Amino acid sequence: MRKWKVVVTDWEFADLRYEEQVLSSERIQLVPAQCRTEEDVIAACRDADALINQYAPISRKVIERLEACRVITRYGVGVNTVDLQAATEKGICVANVPDYCMDEVSDHALALMLAWTRKIALANQAVKSGVWDFKVTQPIVRLRGRTLGLVGFGNIPQALAQKVKPLGLRVIACDPYIPEAVAAASGVKLVTLDELCGSADIISVHAPLTQATEGLIGEQQFAAMKAGAIVINTSRGPVIDERALIAALQAGRIAGAALDVVEREPIPPDNPLLAMENVILTPHVAWYSEEAAAEMRAKAAMGVADVLLHGEYPKYLVNKEVKQRLCLKECCPENRYAALV
């Protein structure tokens, strides 16, 4: 019997133990690769039945050269590395892992908010340089009574909304895909993006990166913000127009920013954000905990198993339109996935 060929296009982990555990069937051959370019992916994956992807480009050019692929799963929430339209046209399922790091990212956004508003990074730097003086942090304003604006109101910002309630923050959100009843159940008011930018003291970005959201927070939005506003981003760097952000910070149109993601990663050494005392930067770490990493990897592998071993659509199917081109069973994942977490 022919084995299913599953290629891990690229990864940053020490090993592939979780993927190997999930895909330990004799019917599957797990093939590690470290692809960087379209040509790398084509060479490694032309005859693959499934791909597990991190950052390698799965473009239309790549997808059109795949001869046997039935499913592409991606480590993480975003699927911006994969051309969804091309995959759908070719009858390939695309799956992600949307629920593996809800606590980690919402915790990190909260940590950035508290660190910036309490000037933790600035105070730490001052003390370590020999300055023991609270005045280096001035001004600090009370958090209670301020307005937090959430750009996007999916699972992660919904979790964040609950975590900030004890802090006495008013929460508003902008998300055209979320019903008002869902927001109301969390005590959150849905508003337009313009209203959010004009009303919020703290703006936390949680929108996925798509063609529609690239540069979503740009010059117009920064111009509408309060002079004392801060911007937090734990989603994807390009959702914010970085040139417009830098201009707004340099002109003092907003008070500061706390960013886990930037447009180019790693951040270039000449990026002006690195020299700004009113900007906190972390290295795209919001998603990470040991538990979250293990869950992400196992669930990405399980999306492959859903299709190849069980003949089902993946539990976390992203391109649902593919069901018009591919006939599989609906996923019944309860027992399989419960064992992973």
Image (tube, helix red, strand yellow):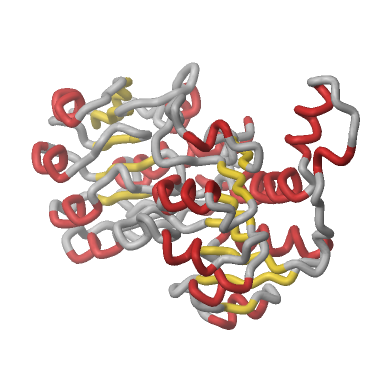
Q: Tell me where residue 80 appears, x and y as whole percent.
A: 33, 47
Q: Residue visible at 51% across and 53% down?
A: 248
Q: Residue visible at 65% across and 42% down?
A: 278
In which quadrant will I find the C terminus?
Answer: top right
Q: Residue visible at 57% across and 78% down?
A: 190
Could you say which is closer to the camera, residue 207 or residue 198?
198
Q: Is residue 187 left or right of residue 236?
A: right
Could you say which is closer to the camera, residue 219 or residue 58?
219
Q: Is residue 69 left or right of residue 18?
A: left
Q: Quadrant of residue 225?
A: bottom right
Could you say which is closer to the camera, residue 27 or residue 212?
212
In which quadrant will I find the N terminus?
Answer: top left
Residue 297 against residue 224 in the figure, above or below: above
Residue 277 against residue 211 in the figure, above or below: above
Residue 153 against residue 293 in the figure, above or below: below
Q: Tell me where residue 141 appears, x and y as whole percent.
A: 81, 57
Q: Tell me where residue 135 appears, x and y as whole percent.
A: 86, 41
Q: Tell me where residue 319 appears, x and y as whole percent.
A: 29, 58
Q: How many marks?
A: 0
Q: Residue visible at 66% across and 44% down?
A: 108
Q: Is residue 303 left or right of residue 308?
A: right
Q: Quadrant of residue 227?
A: bottom right
Could you say which is closer to the camera, residue 267 or residue 256?
256
